[in-house]
Image: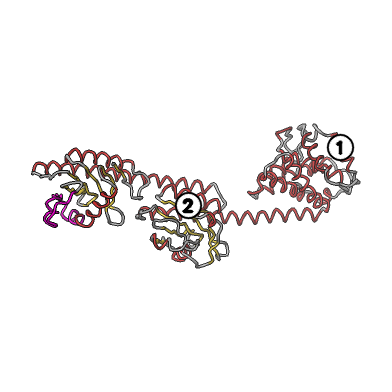
Amino acid sequence: MLVINPTNGNAVSMRWARRALDRAGHDLLIASHSDRAAIWLPAPTGASEVAWSKGFSADALASETSHLDRDHLSRLSLEGIPITVDVAASQQKRNGSDKPRVYRSKALWPLTFDGSLIGVAGCYFRRPRQWGDADLKRMAAFIQQTSSSLHHAQRLDADISEHVRTAGLFHLTEALNQNDDPEAMAVIVLDSVLELLPAESGAVLLLDRHQIYLRVSAARGAPEQWLGQLLPRQEGLPWRCLIAGRVYLTQPAEAGRRSSVEEMPLGQGVAVWAPVCAGPRALGVLALALGDGAQPTEEVRAFVEHAAQIAGNALRRGLLMQGLQQTQLETVLALANAVNARDEYTGDHSKRLAPLAEATARRLGCSEDELEDIRWGAMLHDIGKIAVPDPILLKPGPLTEDEWEIVRRHPERGEAIVRTVDALRRTATLIRHHQERFDGKGYPDALDGDHIPLGARILAVVDAYSAIRDRRPYKESRSHGEAVAELRRCKGTQFDPKVVETFLSVVEAVPMGA
């Protein structure tokens, strides 16, 4: 049986080490004329780990690994010379018997580079094997060359891994810079880190603005019900990590002692906890469970710390933007209320528009996001009238051409006000175009037909119906029937015919008065 397992979970890429081990293993069989062979590499725990083997069963290989660690590893490391064993003779001397074995003799060769043990090569024979000086010199030269090749392959893999991780951190930064939503950022961070590390699961927990709870904002490989759970202050491993302000490790037995979100048993491997901070400000925790048997090397720890730092800076920006957006939204709503306070008609008109516009949009097959944009558009479409002076806005008689020019600017002014809120940018476009005409004779951009956003075409119809029905200082209210007739008369010129008929199907289903 051929086994190649060169990775102990410490590198993103082990391609060159795999190739070097495969070639070294086959060359070892040929050079030593052995029947079976194995190559061990040091594991992060200090024990030996099988990296390549051929001719062994799993049980036999485990037994040999145990013998190597118990009886030979320290000597190979200290003396740096091969160990040859006549198994039959040593057993007879020890037990007075010659029990059947899968091999009769073996030779263990230290793989060294710059005086350090980097692995062990084992050759196994069915018959007793005598080693002459010429054999030993030939094998010593082969082992030296193999050691050098393996070291350089591992170094190349390490360099590639470092490059991949560095590039990964750059791409992570780019992805985070394109997002301002802390919850979405948590998912981006976790997915990026899991892709670049030998980790089988993980989670990102964010601190609430009152610093009372840690919330599981992203999770992979963890119980589904953990997502969204809250950890009260100072409960569980995440809080210990956050309070300590440094990378925190838990061994598998400790990490899995409780099946709860407080202890976060993310997997069978070592768990790595990194505080997510921006300067002195704590924002959350990045938790990762390495693969079974993997250990956190200094490179892995440094990478996790760096990723957590990038996440912290991005999250701080996201939270600042979130706060700014909330302030801007409150400002926009305050301006809308100011318009309503100046003109009772405008406020009531906007409130009535919203449900009619939404119902029409829904019948036209708009998505939930589009419905949300249209709802906001109905409520804020006249916000630009904040710039229209009261004598013009409330004038009971006809407007002069100069006064009309001021009124006609309100869609553009409304767009400029609403666009300051990122969440309302699409709505701002609807506000700009709600006075366009289907025949291209509207304002401010003289768009026509389908060039006018559907939401704006809907607002135009609903706005016109409400304006016809409402009483104004300069006109009396008109009936539902008159409003319907006017909308149908203007189909194809002022209004989108399909939108008109869809809207009328909505209002016909709802009692609208005489």
Which residue is drawn at the image coordinates 28% and 48% (left, top)?
50
Question: Residue 407's x, y, as percent?
Answer: 79, 44
Residue 497 in the figure: left or right of residue 59: right
Question: Which numbered disc covers residue 272?
Answer: none
Furthest residue toward left: 133
- Residue 16 position, x and y percent, is 31, 41
- Identify the secondary structure beneath mark 1: helix
Inter-mark Cα distance, 1 to 2: 60 Å
Image quarter where the C terminus lies is top right
Horizontal placement of 139 versus 8: left or right?
left
Tell me how the rendering is colored.
Answer: secondary structure
In the displayed structure, would residue 187 be above or below residue 489?
below
In the image, 497 versus 394, the foreground residue is: 497
Residue at x-position 36% and y-position 44%: 13
Mark in front: 1 vs 2? 2
Span of residues in magenta:
73-100
Q: Amino acid at mark 2?
A: Gly
Q: Which mark is residue 221?
A: 2
How crowded is the residue under tag 1: few (<14 C-alpha within 10 Å), some, or many (20+)? some
Q: Residue 450, image x and y in percent?
A: 71, 33
Camera-side residue of 340 and 205? 205
Tell me the residue that label 1 is attached to.
Answer: 486
Left or right: residue 317 versus residue 355 is left
Q: Nearer the viewer, residue 401 or 368?
A: 368
In terms of secondary structure, where does tag 2 sit? loop
Q: Residue at x 67, y 42 (%)?
A: 367
